Amino acid sequence: MKNPPARKDPRTPSPPYGYSRECDYSREQQMHIVAEFHAHRIRPSRIAYRVGIDIAFIEALIAGELEPERFPRLVAHYRRNRYQQRLRDSQREQGVTRFELQQRIEADFQREIDL
């Protein structure tokens, strides 16, 4: 008895729940993307939906299971970039409004780095 040759299914599978598209980025690029989105407080499911990165990979990075030394450094880098961008954007304001906004930005940044 000979086994029949396995037929390749020509249909494309539906993407898993939470994915909107295929991911065309390398693992290195995916790690940078996840770090940047995480620094901007975007949920893992939303990252997976918007970019198509495997949610298990995203959650493993955030939990520290993958790249436990490198990923936190990337997140810290993107948080500093976000902090500096917010401070630059606050320069458009005047007087007390600018001062209060900068105080809020500083407090947010301190809270994030204490996590």
Image (cartoon, rainbow, N blue to C red):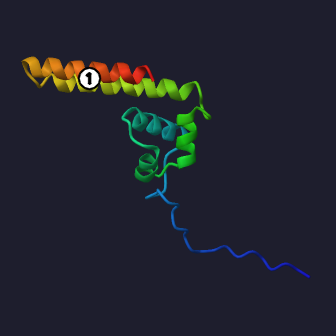
Neighbour tally class for label 1: few under 14, some 14-19, many 20 plus, Cα within 10 Å: some
Q: Residue at x 39, y 28 (%)?
A: 78
Residue 82: image quadrant is: top left
* Whole-percent x, y for residue 99 in the image: 15, 17
Q: Is residue 96 left or right of residue 88?
A: left
SS of the residue under disc 1: helix
Q: Residue at x 45, y 28 (%)?
A: 75
In the rendering, at what x and y percent does residue 72 appear? 51, 26
Which residue is found at the position 53% from the left and 29% from the top? 71
Q: How many marks?
A: 1
Question: In this orientation, which residue lies closer to the viewer: 65 or 89?
Answer: 65
Q: Is residue 81 above or below residue 28?
A: above
Q: Amino acid at mark 1?
A: Ile
Q: Position of residue 35 (x, y in %)?
A: 45, 34
Q: Quadrant of the N terminus?
A: bottom right
Residue 92 picture location, percent across and down: 12, 25
Residue plotted at (13% across, 21% down): 98
Q: Nearer the viewer, residue 1 or 38?
A: 38
Residue 65 against residue 104 in the figure, above or below = below
The residue that disc 1 covers is 105
User: Which residue is situated farthest in the left direction here?
Assistant: 94
Please indicate whether residue 60 sits to the left or right of residue 35 in the image: right
Q: Quadrant of residue 13?
A: bottom right
